[in-house]
Image (cartoon, grey):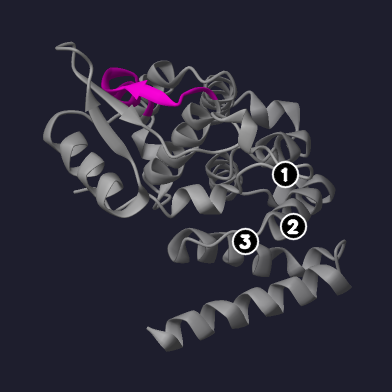
Amino acid sequence: MGREVEASSAVAYTVEQLVAVNPYNPDILPDLENYVNEQVSSQTYSLDANLCLLRLYQFEPERMSTQIVARILVKALMAMPAPDFSLCLFLIPERVQMEEQFKTLIVLSHYLETARFRQFWDEAAKSRHILEAVPGFEQAIQAYAIHVLSLTYQKVPRSILAEAINIEGLSLDKFLEHQVTNFGWVIEKDHGRGQLIILPRNEFNHPELKKGTADGIPLEHVTRIFPILG
């Protein structure tokens, strides 16, 4: 396992050097494309390298790989609430954006930005061929959904949580048990109407906790709460 981590770091270091020294050199195109696939397989992420590749595609449009561009956009969706998707989309020609898979990804981004999670999961289910090529997608979006809920709720009804993270039944029971055990979630009965989940206190759902120089909750802190869901 250690060797795999070292290899991944070596690739990242090399690509970052290439980007720093030759950001407009089309000769690095294959390295950057390989690095996108490396990010997918190793579940890592480099926005700077991906933006550099999209800029190079602008100068070398005949060399553009739509499969690579789609993977970049899916990884950018996984980075929400960061604005990476919009940054990437800005560098993609409009004629390419009109292709069906990109129109779908743009719709998905709008649903996430407006917290319309039911519509998001319904649309995502129709596009599994695009999304399942990128491991960790579902967990990343579930983490984002929890982040959004934590901005609003101190207590969230089980039904709202289930819809937002697209988990229900026994799988949701297993997920909640994990959160209660490891991350301080509390479950209480809602007077016979089901369960209420008390989310951990933060500066958003408890404004009195807000610090003078608060920057919000980094998404990487949120993603740690997600177990591997079976």
Instruction: Give the overall secondary structure of the magenta segment.
Output: helix
Q: Which residues are magenta?
A: 152-164
Give coordinates of residue 183: x percent, y percent.
Answer: 36, 50
- Mark 2, residue position: 48
Specify the amino acid type for callout 1. Answer: Asp
Q: What quarter of the picture does the N terminus occupy?
A: bottom left
SS type, badge 2: helix
Specify the amino acid type for callout 3. Answer: Glu
Q: Residue at x 55, y 28 (%)?
A: 151
Q: Are marks 1 and 3 in contact (CB under 8 Å)?
A: no
SS type, badge 1: loop
Q: What is the spatial separation of the Cα atoms under label 1 and label 2, in whole angstroms?
A: 22 Å
Q: Residue at x 71, y 27 (%)?
A: 95
Residue 219 located within the stretch drawn in magenta = no
Q: What is the spatial separation of the Cα atoms under label 3 and label 2, in whole angstroms?
A: 13 Å
Circle 3 crowding by C-alpha within 10 Å: few under 14, some 14–19, many from 20: many
- Mark 3, residue position: 33
- Mark 1, residue position: 215
**Mark sitting earlier along the chain (1/2):** 2
**Mark sitting earlier along the chain (3/2):** 3
Q: Which mark is residue 130?
A: none
